[in-house]
């Protein structure tokens, strides 16, 4: 990952079978230079099945020089020799993940709407922090959790060098304030995979360029 400009961090749909590898290829080709990372996020399958599903996607990401990040599972990230892991607040400690995955691994932490949690993650060695959900999301169960603000992103980027990811219901139509606030990455899923992925990536690029 880098901090040149706001970039896209793709999150997989829960179903990555069927023609999804072809869809991922099309998305990464459409987003060359814009998509920096892809997060493999599946639920309800054992590690062997998850590894089987992940392997072709990992290869596609490697061919396009996009970081392959595993959601939640340090053991799966280690098994796949993934580029990193994304941890929720209940998914383990970044220091322990670093010990398992090595110094080169990219470790991200979900921090919801808390600068304090983000600071703790940074002190524990996280490479990036994620605030969200900013908008209603089909992939993130917000429940009654507090929603983060644009001011949180602005405050974070002024005070800290650790990159910040905005996540949760982000679309080409609502992303420009997040870009203007200084978000390093926009984590996107449904806005890309629920329709034509190439068209969606092009729309995100136009929106980001217009806000820059």
Image (tube, rainbow, N blue to C red):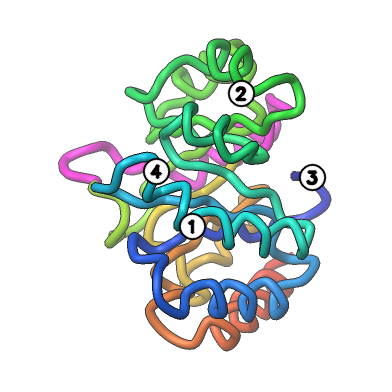
- The mark nearer the N terminus, 3 or 4, is 3
Which span of residues is magenta-colored?
142-163
Residue 120 picture location, percent across and down: 52, 14
Mark toward the viewer: 3 or 4: 4
Check the image and report above or below for 11 versus 31: above
Q: Report, in whole angstroms, how far the alpha carbon at label 4 lies from the one at label 2.
A: 27 Å
* Disc number placed over residue 48 in the picture, else none: 4
Task: Name the quadrant containing residue 7.
Answer: bottom right
- Spatial separation of the CA atoms under disc 1 and disc 3: 18 Å
Q: Residue 126 carries which label?
A: 2
The residue carrying mark 1 is 11
Residue at image coords 46%, 53%:
52
Q: Residue at x 28, y 47 (%)?
A: 45
Regarding mark 4 in the picture, which secondary structure is present there? helix
**149 drawn magenta:** yes
Residue 152, x across and y down, in percent: 51, 37
The residue located at (24%, 46%) in the rendering is 142
Mark in front: 4 vs 2: 4
As measured in the structure, the alpha-carbon distance from the residue carrying label 4 to the one carrying label 1 is: 20 Å
Reading the image, the residue beneath label 3 is: 2
Task: In this rendered view, identify the residue nearer to me: 33 or 58.
Answer: 58
The question of residue 40 being in magenta is answered with no
């Amino acid at each position: 990952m880098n901090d040149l400009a706001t970039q896209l961090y793709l999150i997989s749909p829960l179903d990555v079978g069927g023609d999804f590898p072809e869809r991922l290829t099309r998305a990464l080709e459409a987003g060359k230079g814009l998509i920096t990372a892809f997060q493999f996020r599946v639920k309800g399958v054992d590690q062997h099945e998850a590894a089987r599903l992940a392997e072709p996607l990992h290869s596609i990401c490697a061919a396009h020089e996009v970081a392959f990040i595993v959601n939640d599972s340090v053991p799966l990230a280690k098994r796949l020799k993934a580029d990193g892991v994304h941890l929720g607040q209940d998914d383990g400690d970044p220091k322990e993940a670093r010990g398992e995955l090595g110094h080169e691994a990219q470790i991200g932490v979900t921090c919801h709407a808390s600068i304090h949690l983000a600071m703790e993650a940074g002190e524990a060695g996280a490479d990036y922090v994620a605030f969200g959900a900013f908008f209603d999301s089909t992939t993130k169960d917000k429940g009654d959790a507090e929603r983060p603000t644009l001011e949180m992103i602005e405050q974070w980027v002024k005070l800290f060098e650790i990159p910040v990811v905005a996540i949760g219901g982000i679309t080409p139509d609502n992303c420009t304030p997040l870009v203007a606030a200084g978000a390093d990455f926009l984590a996107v899923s449904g806005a890309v995979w629920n329709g034509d992925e190439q068209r969606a990536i092009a729309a995100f690029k136009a929106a980001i360029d217009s806000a820059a």
